[in-house]
Amino acid sequence: MKLLQIALLPAVLVVISTLLVVWHVRSWRAVRDAEADEADRDFHWRRFRRRMQTSIMVGLVGLAVLGGQLLDFRRHPSLYVFYWTAVVLLLLWIILLALADMVSSRRYLQRWNVERLVALAKLRADAERARSELARQRQREGNGHAPGGLPPEVSDSS
């Protein structure tokens, strides 16, 4: 029972880490195979590297937690302190990578949103120009009606 208590959290962290790695690899392959411009591909590659590094480190933290529970701090107090300091530094690095990913994703999505708004504004301007041109063309041609407003067949018979 004690071994189960010691190994449960590390095992959960390693399983989560493994699942995340598989997910990131699949996501990267989908993005890599999709047609995207160089800036998008570069963003997704850097994001993939950050997320892979973070996911693998979560698994390492899981293994480190297991190893730390097996250390006898009474026999090797300085090793114990050094060990857990390294684990905390690893956690801090994970947090920094997560923050970098958040900032990078936010900037990318803001740029993407601006590009989409510009494209939408261009489409709306093109649609308005087309409507105006169509209205002018209909006005010039009289929309197929005689000057009195009736179709030619009706105005000829009167």
Image: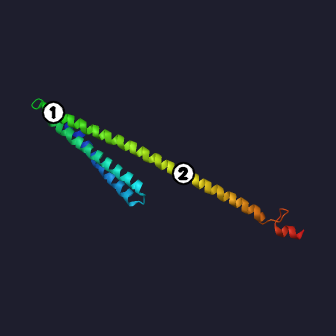
**Tag 2 residue:** 118
Q: Nearer the viewer, residue 18 or 29?
A: 29
Q: What quarter of the picture does the N terminus occupy?
A: top left
Left or right: 155 with respect to 115? right
Q: Quadrant of residue 144?
A: bottom right
Q: Quadrant of residue 57?
A: top left
* Residue 75 coordinates in the image, percent (x, y): 9, 31
**Tag 1 residue:** 80
Q: Residues within 10 Å of mark 2 (few under 14, many from 20)?
A: few
Left or right: 61 with respect to 118? left
Q: What quarter of the picture does the C terminus occupy?
A: bottom right
Q: Residue at x 41, y 59 (%)?
A: 34
Q: Amino acid at mark 2?
A: Val
Left or right: 88 with respect to 142? left
Q: Which mark is residue 143?
A: none
Looking at the rendered structure, the secondary structure element under dot 2 is helix
Can residue 67 be spotted in the picture? yes
Q: Residue at x 50, y 48 (%)?
A: 114
Q: Nearer the viewer, residue 74 or 138?
A: 138
Q: Residue at x 34, y 50 (%)?
A: 46
Please count the marks in the image. Answer: 2
- Residue, far left: 75
* Residue 136 coordinates in the image, percent (x, y): 73, 60
Q: Amino acid at mark 1?
A: Tyr
* Residue 53 coordinates in the image, percent (x, y): 28, 47
Can residue 1 be spotted in the picture? no
